[in-house]
Amino acid sequence: MSLSSKRYKGSSLSFNDVFLPPVTGSNVFPDNVDLSTRLTQNIKTKLPFWTAAMDTVTSSTMAIAIARLGGVGVIHRNFSIEDQVEEVIAVKRSQSGMITNPVTVTEATTLAEVEQLSARYKNSGFPVIDSRTKKLLGLITNRDTRLHSPKTLVKEVMTPRPKLLTQQSNTTSEEALKFFIKNKLEKLPLVDKNDNIVGLYTWKDVAKKQQYPNASLDHQDRLLVGAAIGVFGDDLLPRAQALVDAGVDILVMDAKNGHHQSSLKALEVLKNKFPKIEIVPPNVVTAKGALAQIKRGAAAIKVGIGVGSICTSTDVTGVGMPQFSAVLEVSEAIVKKNIPVIVDGGLRSSADIIKAFVAGSSSIMSGRLFAGTDETPNEPLSEDPNFKLYRGMGSSGAQSGRYSSRYLQNRVPEGVESAIPLRGPVEKIVATLVVGIKTSMCELASVKVKDLWKREFRQYTPSGISESHPHDIILLEEMRRSTQ
Ligand code: XMP
């Protein structure tokens, strides 16, 4: 191949190839930095982080943890439809603001039935209503049911009105918090002017809102959550429908290549069927790919092919693009479309995240950065309990899962399995990344992520890269390890 060929489009850069010169006169300090961003066209969060839709990274436990911190998790799809829906419901039920449609009982319900409802809905108390008029008659909580026979009727032990304290339907969660503190109660039923039940606050939910002030919340103050769906197969629409019915906020199409006709067609079909849901199509790396997806209703453009730490697809196919150039090409091409860019894969540190923002993205998705933490769905490895598994969704291990079809067409593995040292709670990882990002933003005179889109970048030479890492020394840690 001659480099004078018209088909040769020049070289491309990875994060490692670029560095960011500091901005003279920056007066930004960490406290001024605001990492809130747009994850998708209509969803904003306080932190620019997504945890990847991988079966060694994100199920409901991780999705709850990252959403409480200010990001969003994407529930992987190596699940039956029913099990994936359960995961979404677990996130949505983990906390809420005012419960607008509380589960209720009547005076004739038995305590045995109340117990069953408690186990099913993980609730410790229910409003008691008149089954005919729907008027609120009282409240039954696990404090009332203790020490009574299961056959006892609710009306015999409930806290009846007017003894039961209630508030009007327009009560805010801040007012509910004051109510709970003042009255030392844990449930607050809300009634309309006809005394019908219209909502319920619980101490648990209101306290969580205070505990996690950065949490990513929907309009009912429930945690935001994404879920992965495929591109092919008979279960595409039923899965999407079931996830939407369960309350998912973002459908993330998980396939290796978003440029293909099949991906574009699937996006069109899904967008027609679910016009109000934010749909993020599969990854692209070119301007043309991104524009084709925007035309079909993409809520964000996810960039990255062949760059994941566990990915071997470029080894297999030769198709992909180094991540810095891919983000740059895509974000510059779509800058006027007002659709945010997500950088997916290839990130090793806060420095790479900053470079991803400088290239034009609004948020990052990662598996590697969050793998090995307490909240991932897998247990420590039996070979060595100091490590957890982190594997590509195209690895043979993940592909042997019954529901995975990311790379099924040819069954050549396009990912590998790896061992990651245990890394503790994800909160610690997020805190370290945030400190690194904020420090960098101070040096780059940037208060918001989008300020970074204007910053300069330059290319390293190979000797520049080696100079920018520790060199010409023996690391003490390594010396100690070798003499042990
Ligand atoms: P990191 O760098 O965080 O990348 O490990 C995570 C992203 O990689 C993608 N992914 C894969 N890509 N083969 C691939 O080519 C795979 O087996 C595979 N599994 C995940 C995915 O986009 C993820 O978010």
Image (spheres, grey):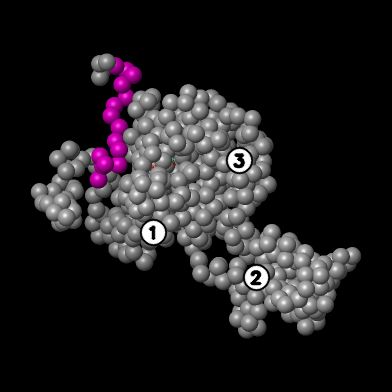
Q: Nearer the viewer, residue 263 or 446?
A: 263
Which residue type does callout 3 highlight? Answer: Ser
Which residue type does callout 2 highlight? Answer: Thr
Q: Give the number of marks.
A: 3
- Which residue range is magenta in the image? 5-19
Q: Which mark sits nearer the N-terminus, 1 or 3?
A: 3
Displayed-image quarter of ligand 1: top left
Q: Residue at x 30, y 32 (%)?
A: 12
Could you classify mark 1 by the number of other residues whose Cα lies within 10 Å: few (under 14), some (14-19), or many (20 or more)? few
Could you give the CA–CA distance between mark 2 and mark 1, rounded to whole angstroms?
30 Å
Judging from the image, what secondary structure is the residue with disc 3 in? loop
Q: Nearer the viewer, residue 421 or 279?
A: 421
Determine whether the beta carbon of the residue marked 1 sits less than 8 angstroms from the nearest atom of ligand 1: no
Q: Is residue 221 above or below residue 259?
A: below
Q: Can you tell which mark lies on residue 202?
A: 2
The image shows residue 67 at horizontal and vertical percentages of 51, 57
Whether the residues at callouts 3 and 2 have beta carbons within 8 Å, the answer is no
Disc 2 versus disc 1: nearer the observer: 1
Q: Which mark sits nearer the N-terminus, 3 or 2?
A: 3
Residue 414 falls left or right of residue 222: left
Q: Nearer the viewer, residue 333 or 164?
A: 164
Judging from the image, what secondary structure is the residue with disc 2 in? strand
The image shows residue 297 at horizontal and vertical percentages of 57, 37
Pointer 3: what residue?
80
The image shows residue 57 at horizontal and vertical percentages of 46, 48
Q: Is residue 78 above or below residue 182?
A: above
Pointer 1: what residue?
424
Which residue type does callout 1 highlight? Answer: Gly
Q: Is residue 86 magenta?
A: no
Could you give the CA–CA distance between mark 1 and mark 3, rounded to whole angstroms?
29 Å
